[in-house]
Amino acid sequence: MDARSDLPSHEVTNQPPPRRDRDLWASDPVLRAHAIGANEDVLARYGAALGRAEMRDAARQAEQIAPELRLFDPGGRRLDEVRFAPGYHHLMTLGLEAGYAAGPWTGGSHVTHAAQVYLHSQVEPGTCCPMTMTYAAVPALAASPALAQQWGPKLTAPAYDPRAAPIHHKQAATLGMAMTEKQGGSDVRANTTRAEPDGEDFRLMGHKWFCSAPMSDGFLTLAQAPGGLSCFLVPRWLEGGRNAIHLMRLKDKLGNRANASAEIEYHGALAYLVGEEGRGVQAIIEMVHHTRLDTAIAPAGLMRAALDHLHHWTRHRTAFQRKLIDQPLMQSLLADLVLDWEGATALGLRVARAFDGDTPEDRAFARIAVALAKFLNNKLCPRVVVEAMEGLGGMGYVEETGLPMLYREAPLNGIWEGSGNVICLDILRSLAKDPLAGETLATELSAAKGADRTYDTALAAHHARWPKGPEEAEARWFAESLATLLTASVLIRQALGAIAEGFCATRLAGERGHIAGTISGLNTGALLERLGP
């Protein structure tokens, strides 16, 4: 039933109608255009389910009712548990049952998974974290066949089982990661957590500064063993008791509020070696590689959600006797932001297709391209969200609109797993150590030559500026240039002409200002159609 507009003191006018159930897949022509090779039936069901008003209510509850740390029971016995709002569990159930974490390992594809990340990020990004880490842990466990045999079926079960119970008692499981320490941050080789042999297994002693999703059934973690820095699987629950993992406190974070992040300590926690002793970084890198895919596509989902809010507002809000959507300056701003969003979506899903490939070339391209996509997409995301928020005026600053949640979330994926500088240095290392990565990237860039003169000129300028790669001090400039060219190459080869032409003209030619909307000559009509009906 509609809310009342005829109030005792005034009549409510010039306000957009409330958002009701909406299909996030059917209403998004950009996602449908670039999710090449995805299972459209899965995405249609997932997009329709996430778009229901009840899921928005669950998301709001999950964010507003903060996770609660329960260290002890009433008698003083240690619990070391986190309690979540019902909305959190509702969203986790929806995602895991839909195959968010399991899909690529049970006959699905990474493209479908990436599209699910994009869709879920629009509604409640916090619950993406535990599902993403569970998805990414599966290939990491392949280094230890016995652990993979025991944990794999639980991690890839299309179900959610949040009970505090050992793995073999559960229908399904989630797996997290605990690597960061106070003194090292991204320099994990500086970790000081110790691993002492205990028969065939190990006991860990140490502190972890960031542990996301501390209610996971286990964590992949790094510790110094007698043979050097090694990777371990630390189960949360043991037969007959709790593992010696103590939650010290929950982080008071800017955003991602539905998801708990904790400082934890290992006080002789039982741990199983993953891979070879002394090769911990090599063992855990597969998990990092796959979480990076999600941090590359999630910002595109956040951009989509922000622009959807702005589009809805401008279609129903009048100022100066005209709808906002009909005003040329608003059209220029929206069109410019659409190019950021569509470019990020196209690049993220192109990278996901490389994850689905099985050739050495596919794997090499995936390694370099996912780093480029993560870097560029996360630098663009805050700009798009801020402009969308500003487009709503004061209402954009109000929690009820959903824009503040997106604003708080916008920096997260660029920070998680490695900040911008770390990613840029990783790009340089990959190109230096893996010639095939550079070759596949060059092939991808060359495939778009001849279709757009601006692109050809920009590509030649990039090679002329860095014929042998950049010095470290120019790594960010180099990565931005390369990632922008890669995005343009994808758009030229698979997008509508107006999208690719507009992207190249405004991102590669330089005839524009430095802030959003400072452009001219775009086909704004074609670009605004990308926002959907």
Image (spheres, grey):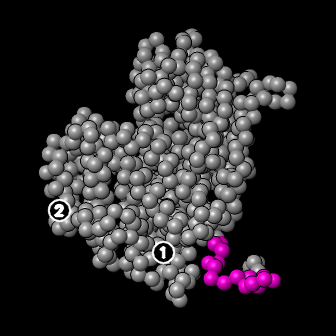
Task: State how far apart marks 1 and 2 are (Cα).
Answer: 31 Å
Residue 125 x, y percent position in the rendering = 57, 52
In terms of secondary structure, what is the magenta stretch mainly?
Answer: loop
Q: Residues within 10 Å of mark 2 (few under 14, many from 20)?
A: some
Tell me if residue 357 can be seen.
no
Residue 525 x, y percent position in the rendering = 39, 80
Residue at 15 percent of width and 56 percent of height: 460
Question: As shown in the figure, which amino acid type bears the numbered disc 2?
Answer: Asp
Count of numbered circles on the image: 2
Residue at 58 percent of width and 38 percent of height: 212
Residue at 67 percent of width and 23 percent of height: 243
* SS assignment at label 2: helix
The numbered dot on residue 405 is: none
Q: Which residue is mark 1?
A: 532
Q: Residues within 10 Å of mark 1 (few under 14, many from 20)?
A: few
Q: Is residue 254 above or below residue 449?
A: above
Q: Are marks 1 and 2 in contact (CB under 8 Å)?
A: no
